[in-house]
Each structure stands twice: as structure tokens, then as C-alpha cells.
């Protein structure tokens, strides 16, 4: 297919060849270790916590097992891809750096729970070669050509665009067309060039390119959260944040989806969108919920920047670790009688706390970082419902015992809060 399928500029000097278009975005098999496939459990947790104040769906505090099997095919395991450009001198050069490395649940889980898939690649084909779809099992390094095998199922689109608009709006294309790359040489010699990309969503790519070409009458005013996340990914990859920012407020204000109150795929879409468009409050809320409900280490899902994921994992482990340490130190304090108003008080509270820890799987072995299978929100919900013993203090008044160390809800109330979300301006 040599003729353009989409013409944004009939005199355009650049043809973007999009191969393997509309590849799965947010494939759950890509990141099974993130625990994102366990959404069916969250509705049960919500129901139990609302009706009884505790979650009986877990045999121990927040401990679950990961669903699913291995990581899927090599094609699905491909890492975030980078543009594969060649210098005229055949000297490899590093591409623009890609992004690297996830409250209470809602009553109804989301129907889709897929984590982020990988970032598509952009690379160059020999002009003498026909357009071919990317090979599933070959990962090439920057500066190396890619061997490709076509497939009849793989969609291919050819989009004719203006080099002038690309040069002004995209730092990526500016470097590609004016630097010392193979594309640059071809463009300067022939005043035309083909650039090949893979995996992108065709609708998202057309939206971005129409923004770049100022074709405002063809740009939708309302995008779904999914489409907005795809457009943000493209804008980040092609380095045209300033151009897209003109439309950001319109799209965000028109969003119908709200931040989910469960640990699901849409929550990570919100983390990505709020990070990229600098939505401080929404970013804080989304990261709080992700950390509070994550059953293990969070993953970037191929999209969220490494500093964000590292900060989320660090804070989650820190807060859960503080809760576990507090429980065990309190138990030890009752044992050595440094806590409790009397021998009877410390002995009774020691026994009661030991029983609670044991029944919730927190006694032995003691949970340790990275606390896989342990959800902070479920942990603190259980802690808030530890049963405190009740006994009478026989004195001249003959009243029930009521010192400050005889109530678990009073002792641990400072721990029974969601994990505070991240501040974007501090990362």
C-alpha cells in the first residue's frame, strides 16, 4: 500500500507508516505480578467493610494469591519501545529516554482491569523495501535495523503530514528530520521521507497529529479516560507537551470518569493522566488509593515514571512496616510489663493481642517487606476491629477496667488511615 490512508496535508513531505495499529493497550497478561487481576475480591471487601466493619473475605489480613499464570508471549513481553534511528555514519545513538516504572473500594468493580501495555516504537524502513508489520519476537537495539514479518491481521496506515508543523510542534520530529540520522539525510535530499511507527492507536495518533496541524474543527472535545491516556502517551513520546496542553483543560473538564475507589486498571490510567497533565489533587488521590490497596509492589505498567513508582513502593512499605512494627512492639511491651497499668492488665492485653495477631496471620512468621499479598487498607481495617478484652477491677467502686492501654481501638487509631498520596511537586 503506497497511497496515504489519511491525508492531513496534501502537500505534506512526511508519511508516517503506522504498522500493527491498535495493538492491545493495557494488557493484563503483561503485568500479572501487580495483582491487577484480583478485582473480584474488592467488591466483597467493600460489602463486608460497609455491613460489618470488617472484611471476612480474607483468611488473614489482606493476604491474597495472585491470579493467572506466566507472563504471556514474547510479543506481549516487549518492553517500552524506543525509536530506532540510524545515523548516516551508522553510529548508534541513544533515543530520547522513555518513561519507566501503580481509600476504600467501590461497591461495584470496573469491568476492565487491564494494566498498561508497552510503549510503541518508531523506526525507519529502507525506501526500497515494502512496508511490513513488525516481528513479534525480535527486539532491536537503537541504531539497528529491524527484521519484520508481515501478518494479514496487522493493520497498516499511511498518514501524510506536514514537515513544517512537525518541526515546530515536536522536539522528537525536529531532531529526527534535522539531525544526523538516516531520516534527516533522506528528507534533506528528497524533501520527503517515510517514518515507521508500530502499535499506536490510530485514533489517538490522528488526534495528536490534528492538534499539531491546528485542525481544531476535527479534534473531539470529549475524550474517554482511555483515549486521553493514549494521547498523553503519544504526546510524551513525541515530545509535544506544550502543543497538547492547549487542549488538556478541555479534555479533562469533559471527562465523565471519576477516580475509582478500587485497585484497578483505571486507577493507573488516572495516575498517568494526572501526572502528565500536572493535576496535583487528582494525582495525590489516585496514588493514595493505589498504595492503600496494592497487594504488593506496584509496577509502572510501562508508563508511569520510575521516580513515581519508586516513591509509591517506598511509602507503601514504610507505612505497612510501621503498622506491623507497632503491633509487635506493643505486644512485647505488654510481655515485659512496660505497658499496662498492672500485672493483670498487661497479662490480659498481651494474651488478647497475641490471639488477634495469630488469627490474622501477623504473628509468625512476621510479615516483612515488600509485604507481598498484604494490603494496607485491609490491614488497618482489621486492626480497627481487634477485640479488646473486658474485665472488672475489683476495688471499692467495683467498676470495669478502663485504663488507656486496655483498648486496641484507642491504641492503634493513629494507624487506621489510608496512605497519604504523593505530592507531584515534591518528586
Image: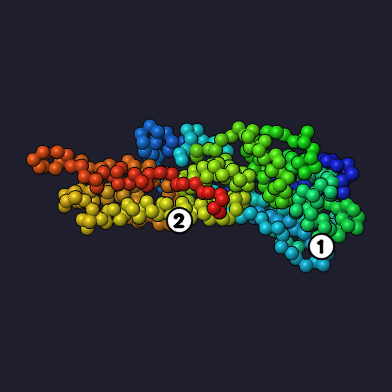
- Residue 60 at x, y = what percent? 37, 46
- Asked where in the image residue 214 lies, by quadrant, the reply is top right
> Which scheme is used to colour this image of the protein?
rainbow
Callout in the foreground (1, 2): 1
**Could you tell me residue 355's position as x and y percent?**
27, 48
The residue that disc 1 covers is 180
Residue nearest the observer in this picture, 265 or 312: 312
Taking the image as drawn, is residue 348 in sight? Answer: yes
Considering the numbered disc 1 on the image, is that residue within a helix, a strand or a loop? loop
Number of numbered callouts drawn: 2
- Identify the mark at residue 370; answer none if there is no mark: 2
Q: Which residue is drawn at the image coordinates 63% and 47% (left, top)?
A: 276
Residue 22 visible in the displayed image: no
- Badge 2: residue crowd in 10 Å (few <14, some 14–19, many ≥20): some
**Spatial distance from mark 1 to mark 2, Cα to Cα?**
46 Å
In x, y percent, where is residue 41? 46, 40
| Residue in the image at 43% along x and 57% along y | 369
Res. 217 image quadrant: top right
Q: Residue at x 27, y 56 (%)?
A: 332
Quarter placement of the N terminus: top right
**Quadrant position of residue 218:** top right
Q: Work out whether mark 1 precedes mark 2 in sequence or the reverse, and give the earlier one.
A: 1
- Farthest left residue? 396
Q: Which one is in front, 66 or 92?
A: 92
Residue at the far right in the pictured view: 190
- Binning the other alpha carbons within 10 Å of mark 1 as few (below 14), some (14 to 19) or many (20 upward) gives some
Farthest residue in the front direction?
425
**Label drawn at residue 15:** none
Location of the C terminus (image quadrant): bottom right
Q: Secondary structure at mark 2?
A: loop
Q: Residue at x 70, y 33 (%)?
A: 221
Amino acid at each position: 500500500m503506497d497511497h496515504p490512508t489519511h491525508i492531513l496535508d496534501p502537500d505534506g513531505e512526511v508519511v508516517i507508516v503506522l504498522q500493527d495499529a491498535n495493538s492491545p493497550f493495557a494488557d493484563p497478561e503483561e503485568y500479572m505480578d501487580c495483582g491487577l487481576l484480583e478485582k473480584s475480591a474488592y467488591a466483597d471487601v467493600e460489602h463486608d467493610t460497609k455491613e460489618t466493619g470488617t472484611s471476612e473475605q480474607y483468611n488473614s489480613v489482606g493476604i491474597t494469591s495472585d491470579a493467572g499464570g506466566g507472563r504471556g508471549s514474547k510479543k506481549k513481553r516487549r518492553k517500552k519501545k524506543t525509536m530506532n534511528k540510524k545515523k548516516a555514519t551508522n553510529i548508534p545513538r541513544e533515543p530520547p529516554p522513555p518513561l519507566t516504572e501503580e481509600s476504600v473500594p467501590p461497591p461495584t468493580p470496573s469491568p476492565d482491569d487491564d494494566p498498561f501495555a508497552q510503549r510503541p516504537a518508531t523506526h525507519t524502513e529502507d525506501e526500497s523495501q515494502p512496508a511490513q508489520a513488525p516481528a513479534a519476537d525480535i527486539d532491536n537495539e537503537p541504531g539497528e535495523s529491524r527484521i519484520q514479518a508481515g501478518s494479514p491481521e496487522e493493520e497498516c496506515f499511511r498518514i501524510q503530514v506536514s514537515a513544517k508543523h512537525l518541526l515546530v510542534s515536536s522536539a522528537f520530529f525536529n531532531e529526527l528530520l534535522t539531525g544526523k540520522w538516516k531520516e534527516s539525510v533522506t528528507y534533506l535530499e528528497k524533501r520527503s521521507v517515510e517514518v515507521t511507527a508500530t502499535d499506536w492507536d490510530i485514533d489517538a495518533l490522528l488526534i495528536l497529529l490534528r492538534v499539531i496541524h491546528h485542525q481544531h474543527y476535527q479534534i473531539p472535545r470529549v475524550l474517554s479516560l482511555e483515549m486521553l491516556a493514549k494521547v498523553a502517551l503519544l504526546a510524551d513520546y513525541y515530545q509535544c507537551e506544550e502543543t497538547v496542553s492547549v487542549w488538556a483543560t478541555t479534555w479533562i473538564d469533559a471527562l465523565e470518569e471519576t477516580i475509582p475507589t478500587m485497585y484497578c486498571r483505571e486507577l493507573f490510567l488516572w495516575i498517568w493522566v494526572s501526572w502528565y497533565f500536572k493535576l496535583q489533587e487528582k494525582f495525590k488521590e489516585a496514588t493514595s488509593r493505589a498504595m492503600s490497596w496494592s497487594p504488593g509492589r506496584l509496577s509502572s505498567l510501562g508508563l508511569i515514571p520510575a521516580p513515581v513508582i519508586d516513591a509509591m513502593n517506598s511509602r507503601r512499605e514504610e507505612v505497612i512496616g510501621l503498622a506491623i512494627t507497632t503491633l509487635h512492639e506493643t505486644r512485647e511491651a505488654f510481655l515485659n510489663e512496660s505497658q499496662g497499668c498492672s500485672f493483670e492488665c498487661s497479662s490480659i492485653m498481651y494474651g488478647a493481642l497475641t490471639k488477634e495477631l495469630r488469627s490474622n496471620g501477623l504473628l509468625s512468621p512476621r510479615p516483612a517487606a515488600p509485604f507481598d499479598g498484604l494490603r494496607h487498607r485491609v490491614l488497618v481495617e482489621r486492626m480497627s476491629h481487634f477485640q479488646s478484652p473486658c474485665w472488672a477491677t475489683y476495688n471499692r467502686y467495683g467498676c470495669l477496667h478502663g485504663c488507656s492501654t486496655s483498648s486496641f481501638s484507642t491504641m492503634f487509631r493513629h494507624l487506621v488511615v489510608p496512605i497519604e498520596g504523593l505530592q507531584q511537586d515534591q518528586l
